[in-house]
Amino acid sequence: MTSSSLRPAIFLAAALLPSVQLSCRGDIDATRLEVERRLREPCSATFSASTDRASAYVIELYETSMDFSGDSTQAACTRCLGMSGDCMLSERVCRCGPASTPSVENLSAALSGLRFKGVDEGRTYCVRVTEVATDTSISATEIDECSCDPTWFALPGVLEKAAACALSTLISPSEDSARLDLLCRDDGATGTRTAFTSCLSNGR
C-alpha cells in the first residue's frame, strides 16, 4: 500500500478522534460526608437494644443528570430524587451493627472508611442513608458491611422499618465534602415528618 493511499484513512481516523470522549473516573470518600442534625432535639429510641435486633444502614449513591450548580442545600438532592429518571442509583452498600438510637455519631460511624470507587468525575451525586431497625439476628459488636435485605430499602417495607433517613447535599469526586441532614421517625413537626417520608420514598 502506497503512502498516498494511506492518507484518506489517516484523515478519517483523525476526524473521528474528537468524537471519542473518555470520561475520567474518581472516588468519593463517604467518610468526608459531614452528618448534621438541624433539629435541636435528639432522636428517640425506636426499639430496645437486644441480641435479636440490630441497626442496618443502607447507603445509596445516586448519579444526577440535571444541572444543580449553585445549590448547596439538600433541596437539590430532594428535587433530583423526586423527579423520575433524574437521579439514577449508582451503588448501594449495606452495613450492620448493634441496635442503637439514631444519632449523628452512629451515622458517621456507619460511613467510616467507605469509598465509592470509579465514579464519573464529570458528574454530581447524591447520597442517601437509611437506618433500619431489623428483625433478623445479627451478631455484631461493631458496624461492618452486610448483605442487603430488600425490605430495608424497597417500598412499602422501608416506610415501616426505617428509624432515620439522611440525604446529602450535592457531591462530586473533585469536591467530596458535603453534608447529610439526619431526620428521624419521631420528629414531630408536620413539615419535618413530610421531609422524612420524602427522604425515604423519593426515587424508590
Image (spheres, rainbow, N blue to C red):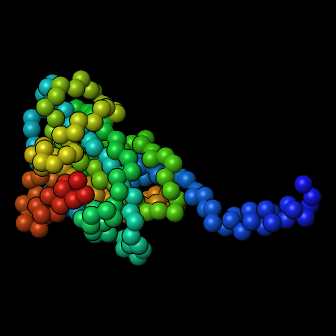
Q: Name, please, the residue furthest toward the bottom.
A: 70
Q: Tell me if residue 77 can be seen.
A: no
The answer to whether 1 appears left or right of 182 in the picture is right
Q: Tell me if residue 52 can be seen.
A: yes
Count every numbered label the image shows and give the total: 0
Which residue appears at 51% of the width and 48% of the height?
Answer: 118
Query: In terms of image quadrants, where is residue 58?
Result: top left
* In the foreground, 152 or 103: 152
Q: Is residue 59 above or below residue 37?
A: above
In percent of width and height, residue 125 lies at 40, 59
* In the foreground, 37 or 119: 119
* In the foreground, 110 or 88: 88
Q: Is residue 56 above or below residue 176?
A: above
Which residue appears at 25% of the width and 57% of the height?
Answer: 203
* In the foreground, 185 or 17: 17
For the N terminus, give its image quadrant. bottom right
Which residue appears at 72% of the width and 68% of the height?
Answer: 15
The answer to whether 76 appears left or right of 41 in the picture is right
In percent of width and height, residue 52 lies at 14, 25
Q: Name, please, the residue furthest toward the right.
A: 2
In percent of width and height, residue 94 lies at 31, 39
Query: In terms of image quadrants, where is residue 35?
Result: bottom left
The answer to whether 110 appears left or right of 23 in the picture is left
In percent of width and height, residue 177 lies at 44, 59
